[in-house]
Image (spheres, rainbow, N blue to C red):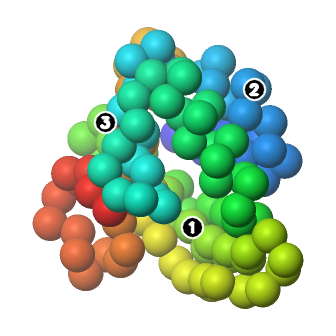
Amino acid sequence: MKDVSVFIQNLYKLFNDRKIEEIIVHMDEDVKWANGMEGNFVYGHDGVREYWTKQFEVIQTKVEPLTIDVESGVIKVHVHQVVHDINGTLLADQLRDHYFRLKDGKIIEFGIRKSEVEDAGWTFDN
């Protein structure tokens, strides 16, 4: 669990520092990644790169992991997410549950849930 926690905390630090390429190297080439802005998913390194590039042009997001749990091969990260528009206006200050699945040390899937109440398992959705 300690290694997983360090791995996940590092990912969020890289995300908050906008180090896209340093995160992508930890993803499988065919990663399935939740698109939190528009819904649905993006796929692969290019899909995630394009999604984050567009996202960082219009909003400033800071996401801090609060708890990290592993159950049945799924990493659940309860996060505090603060979102501002590009001018600094607060758009959201919320708690979310993020889910990761790994294979051979690489992220193969990422999902988002709004709250634990909606969680009927670990299926990934927006």
Amino acid under disc 3: Gly
Residue 51: where, in percent of width, then height? 56, 42
> Could you say whether the residue bearing mark 1 is in a helix, strand or loop?
strand
Tell me what residue is drawn at x 64 percent, y 84 percent: 91
Residue 6 visible in the displayed image: no
Q: CA distance from mark 1 to mark 3?
A: 19 Å
Amino acid under disc 1: Val
Tell me what residue is drawn at x 35 percent, y 43 percent: 41
Amino acid under disc 2: Glu
Q: Quadrant of residue 49?
A: top right
Q: Which residue is mark 3?
A: 73
> Could you say whether the residue bearing mark 3 is in a helix, strand or loop?
loop
**Mark linked to residue 22:** 2
Q: Which residue is mark 1?
A: 79
Point out the tag, 2 or 3, that comes first from the N-terminus: 2
Residue 106: where, in percent of width, then height? 50, 20
Nearest the viewer among 45 and 1 is 45
Residue 7 vs 118, above or below: the answer is: above
Q: Quadrant of residue 74?
A: top left
**Label 2–label 3 contact, CB within 8 A:** no
